[in-house]
Image: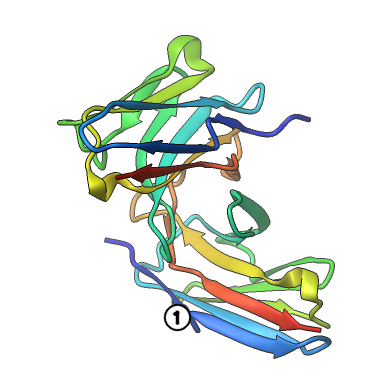
Amino acid sequence: KQEVTQIPAALSVPEGENLVLNCSFTDSAIYNLQWFRQDPGKGLTSLLLIQSSQREQTSGRLNASLDKSSGRSTLYIAASQPGDSATYLCAVPPSGSARQLTFGSGTQLTVLP
Amino acid sequence: EAGVVQSPRYKIIEKKQPVAFWCNPISGHNTLYWYRQNLGQGPELLIRYENEEAVDDSQLPKDRFSAERLKGVDSTLKIQPAELGDSAVYLCASSPSSYEQYFGPGTRLTVT
C-alpha cells in the first residue's frame, strides 16, 4: 500500500527566503507525482506534475524534483512571498494504478511579511 | 474554461439526517473523483468514475454512502444516515485523458 509522508507539517519563514518542502513515498513504482496548493476553505490547485521519466519540473518560482529510486520529491519555492502562504500537498498514484492519487497530509506554509 | 463546480459549499445537518452533494466536472473530462478530506489530512479517494461507470468504489462506505453519475457528466454523492464522523470536506475532481486532476472548491459538511 502506497504511503505518502510530508515533512515538515508546518513551516513559517520570512518573506524573500528560499524554501524546500519534502515528500516521501513508500512504493517507487509510480507513474507520476503531483504537487498541489490548497488555500483555507478552498479546493486543491495543481502546481506541478512530474512524469516518472522526468527528474524535475519548473513553473515560475516553483521547482519540483523527483527521485523515484529513493522515493522522494522536493518542492523548491524561490523568493517566497506572503501570497505563497497555503498548504502544499504532494500526491502519487497508489501501487498499480495510474489514475488515482494517494495524498500526503501536507505542509502548512506561512510566509511572514 | 469553467472549473469543477460543487454545491452546496457548506452544509450543517443533524446526525441521522440524509445529505447530498452535487458535482459538475469540467466539460469533456471523462474521469470523475469524489474525495473526503478530514481536518489536517490529505484527501482520501471515495469513488472514481470513468464516464458513467464506477471503476473503483472500494473506499466508499456502502452501508450509508451512495453515488451516481448520470449520463457520464454530473455526479451526486449521498450519505444516509449521516454520522458525526462524516464531518469533513467532500471534494470532487475531474480529469481528461491525461493524469492531471482538477479539483472543485469542496463541500464542507458539519454533522451535529
Going 59% across and 80% down the picture, which residue do you hit?
Answer: A21
Residue nearest the observer in this picture, B25 or A42:
A42
Left or right for A29, reference A11: left
The answer to whether B99 is drawn above or below residue A61 in the figure is: above
Going 64% across and 86% down the picture, which residue do you hit?
Answer: A12
Check the residue under mark 1 and report the chain it is in. Answer: A
Residue nearest the observer in this picture, A80 or A65:
A80
Going 34% across and 29% down the picture, which residue do you hit?
Answer: B55
Which class describes the residues within 10 Å of circle 1: few (<14), some (14-19), or many (20+)?
Answer: few
> Residue at label 1?
A70
Colouring used for the render = rainbow
Quarter of the image for the C terminus of chain A: give it. Answer: bottom right
The location of residue B97, given as percent across then percent down, is: 59, 33
The location of residue B92, given as percent across then percent down, is: 50, 37
Extreme residue toward the top, this view? B71
In the image, what residue type sits under mark 1?
Answer: Ser
Quarter of the image for the N terminus of chain A: give it. Answer: bottom left
Left or right for B86, reference B101: left
Extreme residue toward the left, this view? B63
The location of residue B51, given as percent across then percent down, is: 47, 20
The answer to whether A49 is drawn above or below residue B95 in the figure is: below
Left or right for A23, reference B111: right
**Dot 1 lies on which element?**
loop
The location of residue B53, given as percent across then percent down, is: 37, 20
Residue B8 shows in this picture: yes
The total number of labels drawn is 1
Left or right for A80, reference B29: right
Quadrant assignment, res A56:
bottom right
Residue A74 shows in this picture: no
